[in-house]
Image (tube, rainbow, N blue to C red):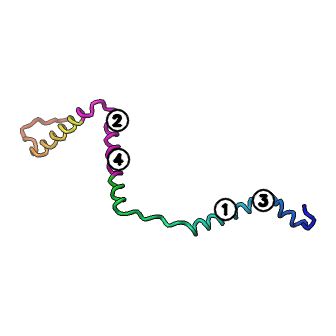
Amino acid sequence: MCLRCTGDDAAQVNPSMAKRIENMQNLRKEKRKLSKRFARPSPVPEPGLLEEKRAKLAEAAERRQKEAASRGILDVQSVEKKRKRKEEIERQMATSGPPPEGGLRWTVS
């Protein structure tokens, strides 16, 4: 403690714990205010760059979907052939119309 300091001045040299915490909180508030005030505006990307990025993201999403669909399947080509064959059979059934009336009927009693 120096000769010129009074009792109150000594507290300024070594403030209490509560006072230190309060000072730190005030400093943080001031820093937030200044960072908001002097924040740089976000740059606006060029339209061509956005389209390229969207295309890349779409390709990546398709690739991930294909990988997820083939996960756990050893022979992907055979599964794909079976799926196409099944779709073609369904398409043929849809275009052939209703089954003839003389067909078999199931009755549950």
Tag 1, which secondary structure? helix
Image location of residue 43, percent across then percent down: 45, 64
Q: Mark 2 or 4, which is nearer the eye?
A: 4
Q: Quadrant of the C terminus?
A: top left
Tag 3, which secondary structure? helix
**Are there few (<14), some (14-19), or many (20+) residues within 10 Å of tag 2?**
few
Q: In which quarter of the image is residue 31?
A: bottom right
- The amino acid at mark 2 is Arg
Among the two numbered marks 2 and 4 on one chain, the one whose residue lies closer to the N terminus? 4
Q: In this view, does 49 lie to the left or right of 84?
A: right
Q: Mark 4 points at which residue?
A: 60
> Residue at point 34% right, 61% down?
48
**Are there few (<14), some (14-19), or many (20+) residues within 10 Å of tag 1?**
few
Q: Mark 4 or 3, which is nearer the eye?
A: 4
Q: Quadrant of the N terminus?
A: bottom right
Q: How far is the residue under mark 4 from the one under mark 3?
A: 54 Å
Among the two numbered marks 1 and 3 on one chain, the one whose residue lies closer to the N terminus? 3
Q: Is residue 3 left or right of residue 60?
A: right
